Every structure is written in C-alpha cells, then in structure tokens.
Image: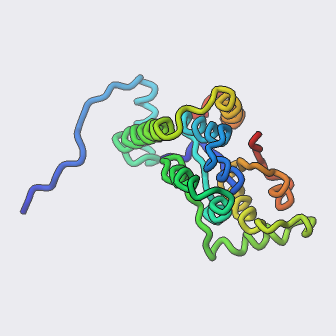
C-alpha cells in the first residue's frame, strides 16, 4: 500500500499572549475545533482576500480613488469604528 | 471565505453595474474584500443581470461569481413560502414591476443574512419592504 501523502505541516508560530490565550479558550470551550484549525482558517481567510484582490487588480485595475473613497465610507459605516473584528 | 464580518446583497442593478465595470460597483466589492466582508448574489437575479448587459460583459459578471468573497444564494422550493409572503405584503400592488420575483429574492436574502442591499434602484425594493436597508449606487 502506498504511503498517504501528507497535506499538513507542523510549524511553530508565535502569537501575542492575549491572542494565544483567547484562541486556547475557544478551543477548550469547544467553540473551535482546535487552535490549529483556528489558525488554518485565519490563514485561508487572508489568502482568499489577497488572492481576490489580486484577481481584481489584474483583471480590472484598481478602481478610481473617488469611487474607492465612497465605498470605504460605506464599509466604515457598516463595520463601525472598532473595525471588522468588532 | 468567512462571512463573519457581514457584507452586501447585490440586486440585478448592482450586478449589471459590476458587469459594465462601473467604478462604484467595482469599488464596493474591492473595499469589502479589503476588510474581509462578502457579497451575496441571489441566483434569481442573474438572468436579469445577463439580460441587462452585453454578451461581452458576461465574462465580467462570471468573474464576480468566482471571487472568494462572493456567496451564492440559491432559489429553491423551500424559499417559496417566504417569497410569497414578501410579494403578498406589498402595500401598493401597482408598484410591483416585472422584476418583482427577483427583487423578492433579494429582500429574502437581505432578511436572512441581516445585510443591506447594494442597488441601483432602492425604490423598487422599498415597495417590497419599506424598512429594508439599502445602499444606492451613485
């Protein structure tokens, strides 16, 4: 039987203590599957965002500043002063 | 991609504006993506968006559908009762236009997600729900 190909890699990362403890609490309470799962999803989320922006820029170019300012104001109004994590 | 940070539901006017590469529609999607917000496309709006745009713009529309921030809201039998309620709740039936079913799907998506609608024509949506949150394209 052929050995199964590995799809994950174990690495060591360093987080601010507050963040590390917050993620550990989420994992301990069962709100997330594991710390690794949480970090995996955060990385996937950021990669999807950056890949999406790269696709848009390559295909259509960056929108004009006046239109971006309008859109960023809408976004700011929706997410509030605390940012998207609020 | 996560939808934790919310986003906008796009109606067929907004989709057509995107397909025509109009800067405000493009900018909203760009800016939403910058902060990790999403856009939802009720699939029932797509035929109208395709009908309102030239064949050469259809690839642009498909590019939006393929973005990682784009969520597809299906139109299924299970949605029919709620869509019926939305259509029956209109205070002025004369205000219903030929795109009423697609707009009802947009209103339904917005209610379900708790998101505002990005539109090119808020008046038609307000006929279905006067309290609907909308952001109108300039």
Residue A3, given in percent of the width and then of the height, sits at 10, 55
Residue B91 vs B22, above or below: the answer is: below
B93 displayed left or right of A43: right
Q: How does the figure colour the protein chain or chains?
A: rainbow
Residue A34 vs A17, above or below: the answer is: below
The image quarter in which residue B34 lies: top right
Name the residue at the left extreme: A1
Give the residue drawn at x 57%, y 45%. B38
Give the residue drawn at x 64%, y 39%. B28
Give the residue drawn at x 65%, y 59%. B49
The image quarter in which residue A69 lies: top right
Q: Does the rendering let one see residue B101?
A: yes
A54 displayed left or right of B60: left
Residue B48, given in percent of the width and then of the height, sits at 68, 63
- Which one is in front, B10 or B15? B15
A28 displayed left or right of B14: left
- Which one is in front, B83 or B125? B125
Residue B28 vs B74, above or below: the answer is: above
Q: Does the rendering let one see residue A25?
A: no
């Amino acid at each position: 039987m052929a050995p199964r190909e590995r799809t994950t890699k174990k690495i060591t990362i360093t987080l601010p203590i507050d963040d590390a403890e917050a993620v550990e609490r989420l994992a301990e309470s069962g709100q997330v599957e594991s710390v690794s799962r949480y970090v995996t999803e955060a990385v996937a989320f950021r990669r999807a965002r950056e890949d999406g922006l790269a696709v848009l820029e390559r295909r259509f170019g960056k929108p004009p500043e006046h239109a971006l300012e309008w859109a960023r104001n809408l976004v700011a109004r929706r997410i509030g002063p605390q940012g998207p994590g609020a | 991609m996560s939808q934790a940070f919310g986003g906008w539901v796009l109606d067929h006017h907004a989709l057509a504006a995107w397909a025509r590469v109009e800067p405000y529609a493009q900018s909203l999607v760009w800016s939403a993506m910058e902060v990790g917000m999403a856009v939802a496309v009720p699939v029932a709006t797509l035929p109208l968006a395709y009908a309102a745009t030239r064949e050469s713009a259809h690839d642009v529309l498909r590019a939006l559908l393929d973005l990682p921030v784009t969520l597809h809201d299906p139109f299924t039998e299970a949605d029919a009762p709620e869509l019926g309620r939305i259509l029956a709740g209109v205070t002025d039936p004369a205000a219903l236009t030929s795109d009423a079913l697609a707009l009802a799907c947009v209103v339904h998506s917005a209610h379900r997600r708790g998101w505002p609608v990005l539109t090119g024509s808020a008046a038609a949506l307000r006929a279905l729900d006067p309290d609907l949150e909308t952001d109108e394209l300039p």
